[in-house]
Amino acid sequence: MSMAAESPIMSVKGLARSFGGIQAVNDCSFDVRPGRITGLIGPNGAGKTTVFNVITGFLGADRGSILLRGREILGLSPHQVERLGVVRTFQHLRLWSKMTVLENVLLGCATPAGENVFSLFLRPGAVRAEEARARERAMEVLEFFGLSGRTHEFAEDLAYPEQKLLSMARIFAADAPVMLLDEPASGLDGESLRRIVPLVRKLVEHGKTVLLIEHNMELISELSDDVVFLHQGRVLAAGAPAEITRDPALTEIYFGV
Amino acid sequence: MDLFLQLAATGLVVGSLYALCALGWGLIYGTTLHFHVAHGAIFTLAAYFAYAGQKLLGLPLAVAVIGAIAAAAACGLLIDLFIYQPLERRGAIRTTLFIASLGLLNVVENLVAIVFKPDPLRMDVGWLSNAVQIGPVFLTWLHLVSVATALAGYLGLMAFLKYSLWGRAIRAVSSSPEMARTVGIDLRRVHLLTYAVGSAISAPAGILVAMDVGADPYRGTTFVLLASVAVIMGGIGSIPGALLGALFLAMLENLGVWKIASEWQSTISFGVFLVFIVVRPRGFFGRKIHSAEI
Amino acid sequence: MTAYIAHYLVMVGIYAILALSLNLLIGYSGIFSLAHAAIYGIGAYASALVALKLGLGFWGGMVIAAGVGALASALVAIPSLRVSGDYYVVASFGLQVVVLAVFMNWTDLTNGHAGLPGIPRPNVLGWVIDQPFEYVFLAAAFAVLTYAVCWRLTNSAFGRVLQAIRDDEIAAQAMGKDVVRVKIVIACISSALGAMAGSLYAHYITYINPSSFALHESIFIASLVILGGSERLAGPIVGTFLLLAIPEVLKFLAIPDTVAAPVRQIIYGALLIIFMLVRPEGILGRVRSETEHAK
């Protein structure tokens, strides 16, 4: 296997997390290699979203470690994880629905001076310049995601596929190297899928590393470079998509035949 | 030592009243997640219902008390039905609900103050106000009744939640509303029931205060906010926690008097509360709280 | 009659500051505080005490008032906002109770119920402001200043973050916003401004006692915000103009004093319920977020 070829940008080791008596994630280990798309798959309840929540600091872990470029990020709070370069989308999008499309993306852009109360009042020039840069960047990002015609609409007024795009645009604006996408294709029809799939590919071309949860097996085969198969909180198999999707034992678990 | 025992006994009596309030408020908060400050209005109304029943309608004490509890329970239910449920249907945020609740508390307290005048009104409880001596400690029969009521309220509530069908529905909603909905529980009806039960449990606290020192229009606010402190210290969603939190708070206030002047009672309580939420934000027995579920 | 109107306008100025600052919490951050009257009181007492005991003037007093107000708020905000907004409600109520206990019971410092008389009038560049109509300008100047501060805060990247936190806190965290820090910062700013209103009040009335800063005053300030509309910067100002007129109207109706106080409270409470049920966006209505015109 070629998996050891490049050193991982993120490696999850021996992760465990239980809720009450239920072991949602149990001794889970896998690597995410830079500049590639890694698909995290598995049947419902396999612990995929829990893994996302632990990586991004929304949930603590009982055991284990998550190294980002060799640095431990387990135990950090969500905003610290984001600042170290890991961003995520949510299954239920969690857009700021009563804010505009532009504002949603602006919140992804870095505006440290404008968010700091002291510089807000004491360094208005720097704040203005930064805001102008952020707007420029936001417009570029919206362009990239094909949303530039929707700039001033409220997020809640967008159609679902566009909301999905916006949720990705928002995290892309943050310019973080690692992007975690929670079911980017769910709920989309054929045409919207054709719009989103090449975009995810383009993220990698822009130097991003993508870890995504997806249920659509066809899409996984088409999109991912590596696949991690999760079952009952453990990694059952990891490798190239072709190997995984062709394995009858895994298919049986996945489809519950 | 005698003073210490006397203060501890007073703490237990006051703690029983706090506990009744905290059990009701905690049940409602744990189940509906409404920050129901208008629970203070229920406390106040129960006191004045009982007073009016006895003094104005001339009902026998027991009838006035039972009638007041039933009326208070009905008021609790109506608040949910006519204020909170319409707000929730409209998708109001929690602050909105809280503001409406606070407004209602303000209206009820001041209406009562106009109708009954602001001065405390005491009910007649006959021999219950006689003193009893237990060792070095002096209490009244009414104080003993307060402790017994709190104990009965606690045990009754636990049994209700554990053994009755409706009680189990409340517990199901309290632990996971989504799950409860999927198994076919009607959340709105469970909320109504929770308000009725929670109000009925706290009503005796108001009535006992009316019997002991007299009903007072503005006491409900303090009681309900102390109840919320007790519930947070005990652990949100935990009934034994609410009881323990209330007793702890009352003991703290009363034993504090031993060393510190009584006007600083509330300062002690809230100081401890602040330390508590730093050290153990989930309380004695509580589940971890999330400001929102992911 | 002019003095009467001047007095009304001064009070509108002071309460507008209180309402604008409280709205930073209620409207822009979705955090409810029950302690704004206590903060107002802290400002008044701090300012009065440094004037009476240290001989410090109006300006020094105001700076100290703002500092003490922010500090008191930080004391409850830091532990409670780390957990949740509901904890802050309880903690702010605690602050309200404790601060009032200090005003009433620390008699050596605060003179208890009797209060503090003889607070000097402000001296602005050698000009002693002692006429109500002169004070109108001072109060208005501070109200405008507060409005400007609130405008800058809410029409900026910082304001955007506040709104994002109110709209979806989890998403804000996921986008790298330090939600707890932002909430604590806004609580402190809100309190610093509220305390300045207290300072303005103390030097205007020249006599303060604890009864002006009780819990019902906190509820009153909240109703100023809600009535005008918490989603627009000008909402609290409209609310202030209208609600401060109510006691004057009641005076004309010749309702006895003992009844007038609870009647006022009932009106405020009823307004809170009615507006939440019927028009939660307040009189001015809703602008759905637009921090965009900030350049």
Image: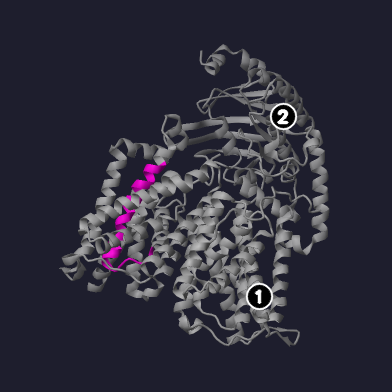
- Residue A34 image position (x, y, % from top left): 72, 32
Which labelled disc corresponds to residue C10?
1
Q: Within 10 Å of the Cα at label 1, are there few (<14), some (14-19), or many (20+) other Cα atoms? A: many
Q: Chain of mark 1?
A: C
Whether residue C257 is visible here, answered yes or no, is yes
Residue occupying image coordinates x 32% and y 55%: B203
**Which secondary structure type mostly characterizes the magenta part of the structure?**
helix
- Residue C80 image position (x, y, % from top left): 52, 57
- Residue B248 image position (x, y, % from top left): 34, 60
**Where's the N terminus of chain C, which quadrant?**
bottom right
From the viewer's perspective, is residue A224 above or below residue C274? above
Whether residue A13 is visible here, answered yes or no, is no
Residue occupying image coordinates x 39% and y 70%: B265
* Residue carrying label 2: A6
Q: Give the mark toward the camera: 2 or 1.
A: 1
Residue occupying image coordinates x 45% and y 71%: C259
From the viewer's perspective, is residue B200 above or below residue B217? above
Q: Chain of mark 2?
A: A
Q: Where is residue C275, by image quadrant?
A: bottom right
Which labelled disc corresponds to residue A223?
none
From the viewer's perspective, is residue C201 above or below residue C234? below
Q: Nearer the viewer, residue B80 or A19?
A: B80
Q: What's the magenta region?
A: B191-219
Q: Nearer the viewer, residue A247 or C137?
A: C137
- Residue C137 image position (x, y, % from top left): 72, 76
The secondary element bearing badge 2 is classed as: loop
Distance from Cα at disc 2 to Cα at disc 1: 71 Å
